[in-house]
Image (cartoon, grey):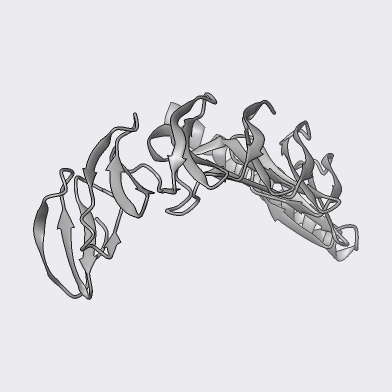
Amino acid sequence: MFKKSLVVFYIIIGITIHSSFAQVEANITKGIFDKAIPLKNGLILVKKGSSYGCIDVAQKVIIPIEYEFIGNFINDLAVVKKNKKLGVITANNTTVIAPIYDEISSFTDQPDYFRVKQKDLFGLIDKTGKFVLPMEYDEIGLFYKDNLLGEGLTTISKNGKYGYANLQGSIVIPMQFDSGDYFSDGLALVKLNNKQFFINTVGATVFVVPSKYHFVDSFSEGRARVSTNDHFGYIDKTGKLVIPMEYQMAWGI
């Protein structure tokens, strides 16, 4: 009986939202809005002219139609753009990060932390608007591989040297490398004085990468793809070649 009631409840809610959105679409026809998109959090993104805002199903304005851009809400937070600058707001229009930054991005697996850029310097801000890492870095985070934060550590860079910091704002591995990759499977590839080697999450060298390898991938499931000329193989976490260099094509694990 409970399951049946729950199903009926969701059907009613669904009909209500669909009906409310139909009314919003009718207002588009009337010229009140130029565009409307239902969001997963129950709000409706609306556009009027070149400005965006959000209304609820009762068509009450929740977020004023004054932004040049409103991103997807994740954990009740969305990146917005106003006067060509970026910030972050909540779904009830509380400003978390003032729109004063040139760039804002977040980690896919840690969406409550935002990397901000202003005048060529980077900082890291949490969901309360507090700085975790100050605005003094040339780079924070290498945002490839789906913007994942590797092992709870992000790369930081200053004056051409790379190190690693955690989300509590502590520099775990000092900025001493010429380059630094993200952590994956407990290891990160770094470079110093034209030598490549893997380090662990406390900065200790695990093994030096032989110079014969022209390409070294990140580790996954205990293996990393390597190549010499046009052939690929795989090494383990000690640097030992465990799958021979005899493949003309290979993919990361």
Q: Point out residue 240 in the picture as x, y percentages from the top left corner.
A: 11, 50
Q: Quadrant of residue 137?
A: top right
Please give left or right for residue 232 compared with residue 198 in the image: left
Q: Quadrant of the C terminus?
A: bottom left
Please give left or right for residue 139 compared with residue 253 in the image: right
Q: Point out residue 199 in the picture as x, y percentages from the top left corner.
A: 30, 39
Q: Residue furthest front?
A: 193
The image shows residue 214, relative to residue 4, as above or below, that is below
Please give left or right for residue 64 compared with residue 77 in the image: right
Please give left or right for residue 130 compared with residue 220 in the image: right
Q: Nearer the viewer, residue 196 or 34?
A: 196
Q: Point out residue 35 in the picture as x, y percentages from the top left corner.
A: 78, 61
Q: Residue furthest right?
A: 31
Identified at 48% across, 42% down, the residue is: 162
Q: Quadrant of residue 164?
A: top left
Q: Is residue 154 visible?
A: no
Q: Point out residue 8 in the picture as x, y percentages from the top left corner.
A: 54, 37
